[in-house]
Amino acid sequence: MAIKNHQLRKKVSICILKKIQKEMKSNQYKKIAMWHKIKSLINQGLNKSQISRELSIDRGTIRKYINMGEEEFYNLIERGRVVPKKLDKYHIYIKEQLELHSYLSSSQIEDRLKESFKDFPKVDSKTIYNFVQSIRKRYGIKKDKDNGRREYEKLAETDYGKQAQVDFGESIIESKTGLRQKVYFFAMVLSRSRQKYVYFQTKPFTSETAILSHQKAFEYFEGEPKEIIYDQDKVLLKDENLGDLLMTEVFRTYLKEKSFTPIFCRKSDPESKGKIENVIGYVKNNFLRGRMYINEELLNQSVLTWLLRTGNGKIHSGTKKVPQEEWAKEKLYLQPFQTIKSKESDKKLYKVRKDNTINYKSNFYSLPLGTYQGRESCVLLKEVSEELYLYNQKEELIAIHKLSKERGVIVSNTDHRRDKSQSILKLKQEVLNMIKEKQRAELYIEEIQKHKPRYVRDNLLVLKKHIPEYSREIISVAIEFSLENNLYNATRFVEVCKYIKSEQEQKQKLQTFVPPGGKPIQLDAKNTDPQKSKLITYQKIM
């Protein structure tokens, strides 16, 4: 029985060997035909780009075949491609990665290998590419083509230390629990060396966290550029709508302490900020793609090692230089890194008087009612551009006053006389009483309080005014949509409600037929094909 099994295995091995030899010969014939076709087209006067389009093959392959004589070519295909044995032990790992995420590029596979195997040998990227392609071909793992790639005109390089570019990105990745996690990231790139820095967090960026990211980037670069280019549609410009503020007085104060000059350009302007747009895409498609989210700290640790290993450690496709090596030259031209002279540290502690005022330079400035909580009550004071900024012990801004040049006057804000804590609490309860899904509504209002602490009353008033205009079903859907998309703004909430209502009315029209001079006839819903609206369509109004 053992002899028969051995003979059977031997026959199967011979069949497999013959099949492989047949495939090899077939591939050789294809290569020979391709080589002769390329030579023929060259003789007809076609250039490499034209041949590439005609035969759908890479220009690099065409260049190699053109520069190769006939004898050299036949020796090459008879010898075949030899895959280094030191890559064999990674065969199964690469196969599993491609089966899980077929869209991964060979560059990403290379980075995963270096990240997962600390003893990974030094191998040329082209060799890894060939190995990955052979695994794809062997197991039939196809990769989707990357469409929609833009081409830009190459501009002259900037001087060392002159410029950096900044932008923000966001992406959704799988978490360890099987759910999807949305992550936000800040990216800065030095324009000359292409040295990059990336910082992640799970909440949208605010003025404070954006400034923190700048400081981390300058520390990483060991210096500051002379100018930084930003996208004017997204960051650093003031926009006020019931509390939607980006980079307002906090950023302006920060700029006074720094030596770089901010420059704003149009959105998606490749001539001005194409370098950082490429970085944003690189982070999404190379670092984040196929990555598992565990926690924020580990994500930031991983991106730093990725930058060292890949983002800044590999030859840049545009400059043909390694960013890390170029940065060693560029940092000599950067301005000295300045820690924030933080006016936060210049804040002075002032006692709160029983009448909810403070005494500053012989004048009295009002505070919101309830600030005084006893003899130990204090606030933090900061003087900026002839204005007083007053903060509570949690360093939350509670009042702003124009600095008086007189003496003995009372500078008061009539708004401070209202007991806001009670009025807001009452207003919140009134809004909740108008909504059926109280638990979800309370969560939504809490998020407004967290993100717009100075505009809670304004948001609640808008909700109170417009909620009666819509059905409970519409309000419920709008709350879920707002929570899922971080829309903590009452004006946007009303816009969502309005959009849902118009969708429902359109659907109703399609299901009802009114004959001339007759009564409305309700059509059979089974025989109608009404327009369907998906949740993603609501995003058009954002």
Image (tube, helix red, strand yellow):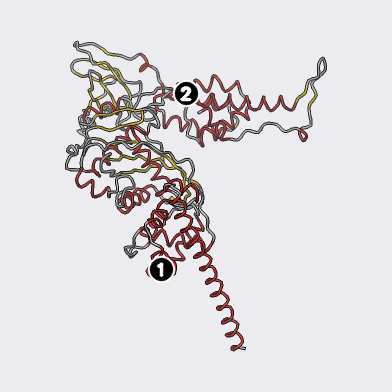
Residue on which the image places disc 1: 75
In which image quadrant can residue 118 be found?
bottom left
- Residue displayed at 44% across by 23% down: 422
- Residue displayed at 29% across by 28% down: 263
Q: Position of residue 236 (x, y in %)?
A: 33, 28
Between 371 and 176, the residue placed more toward the observer is 176
- Residue displayed at 59% across by 88% down: 2
Q: Is residue 156 left or right of residue 37?
A: left
Q: Position of residue 92 (x, y in %)?
A: 46, 66
Q: Secondary structure at mark 2?
A: helix
Residue on which the image places disc 2: 459
Between 514 and 138, the residue placed more toward the observer is 138
Q: Residues within 10 Å of mark 1 (few under 14, many from 20)?
A: few
Q: Is residue 518 left or right of residue 359?
A: right
Count of numbered circles on the image? 2
Q: Residues within 10 Å of mark 2 (few under 14, many from 20)?
A: many
Q: Which label belongs to residue 423?
A: none
Q: Position of residue 429 (x, y in %)?
A: 52, 26
Q: Amino acid at mark 1?
A: Asn
Measured along the vertical axis of the image, is residue 40 above or below residue 455? Answer: below
Q: Position of residue 123 (x, y in %)?
A: 34, 62
Measured along the vertical axis of the image, is residue 313 above or below residue 233? Answer: below
- Label 1, label 2: how far apart the Cα atoms are: 77 Å
Q: Amino acid at mark 2?
A: Asn
Between 541 and 415, the residue placed more toward the observer is 541
Q: Secondary structure at mark 1?
A: helix
Q: Nearer the viewer, mark 1 or mark 2?
A: 1
Discs 1, 2 touching: Cβ within 8 Å: no
Measured along the vertical axis of the image, is residue 392 above or below residue 192? Answer: above
